[in-house]
Image (spheres, rainbow, N blue to C red):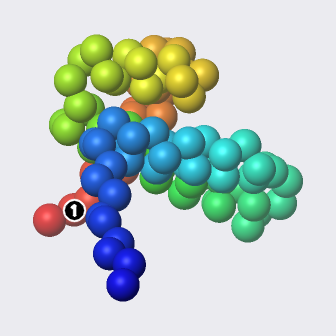
Amino acid sequence: MRLWRKRVVSPFERWKAVLRDDVQALSRETRQGEESRIRFILKEQTLGQHCCEAEEYLPDAELTLLKQELGLTDHQWHTYKANVRLQPF
């Protein structure tokens, strides 16, 4: 009988995967046409939201490494975060 172990994924690895998927989805999106422009904006907001959440869970050293591995500058990171729309209560 095989016993399966649960693979424990570190918060760093989890956020790297989430943000990598967000960056890839955003890069695939075109901005031609109204629907495409709206999808791009929504994906950009999702990426910004995930940037904010990653900052809550990761220490500064891991955030710096995460940005480097994703190829994001501090300016890009802050720009994505600035695109997050606050949800009304």
Give residue 55's position: percent from left, percent from top.
26, 32
- Look at the picture and state if 8 lies above or below 54: below
In which quadrant will I find the C terminus? bottom left
Count the numbered circles shown: 1
Tell me the quarter of the picture where residue 78 sits: top left
The amino acid at mark 1 is Pro
Can you give x and y, in whole percent of width and height, for residue 69 in the image? 54, 24
**Is residue 40 shown left or right of residue 2?**
right
Q: Is residue 63 above or below residue 5?
A: above
Q: Secondary structure at mark 1?
A: loop
Q: Quadrant of the N terminus?
A: bottom left
Residue at the image point whose x is 85% and y is 53% from the top: 32
Report the residue marked by disc 1: 88
Residue 7 image offset from top left, x and y in percent: 34, 58
Q: Residue at x 31, y 22 (%)?
A: 62
- Of 27 and 85, the residue lying toward us: 27
